[in-house]
Amino acid sequence: MAKISTAQTIELELPAEAARFALPEGVDRRLHALLDRQDRGETLTDDERAEAEGLVELADLLSLVKLRAR
């Protein structure tokens, strides 16, 4: 079965406060701990890898929101 992917563009007005969006400190520490382990060549579990990927995506999204809010 073929998988169909569609992309949509959503335009939002962001409040000025969006420029301050960031990962909470504890979440940021967890992300860096997982990435540091991976950089040292340690194998992450499937759950840890999925967690790290999700946190990276969230950090990227927050960075994009901050840039758009300027």
Image: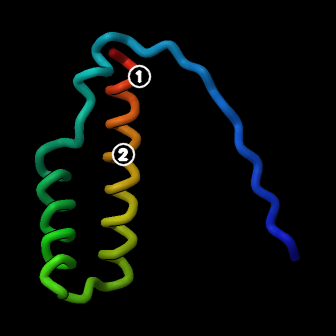
CA distance for labels 2 and 1? 12 Å
Is 58 situated above or below 45? above
How many residues crowd mark 2 within 10 Å: few (<14), some (14–19), many (20+)? few
Q: Quadrant of residue 41?
A: bottom left
Q: Quadrant of residue 65?
A: top left
Q: Quadrant of residue 66?
A: top left
Instruction: Looking at this view, name the residue that lies furthest to the right.
Output: 1
The C terminus - image quarter: top left
**How far across and how far down the image is residue 22, in percent?**
23, 36
Q: Which residue is mark 1?
A: 68
Is 32 situated above or below 20? below
What residue is shown at x 23% (from left), y 42% (from top)? 23
- Number of numbered callouts drawn: 2
Is 32 situated above or below 10? below
What residue is shown at x 40% (from left), y 53% (from top)? 57
Is 43 situated above or below 34? below
Q: Label 2 amino acid? A: Asp
Q: Label 1 amino acid? A: Arg
Apparent side of residue 39 relative to residue 4 in the rendered image (left or right) = left
- Label located before the other in sequence (2 or 1): 2
Residue 60: mark in rendering: 2
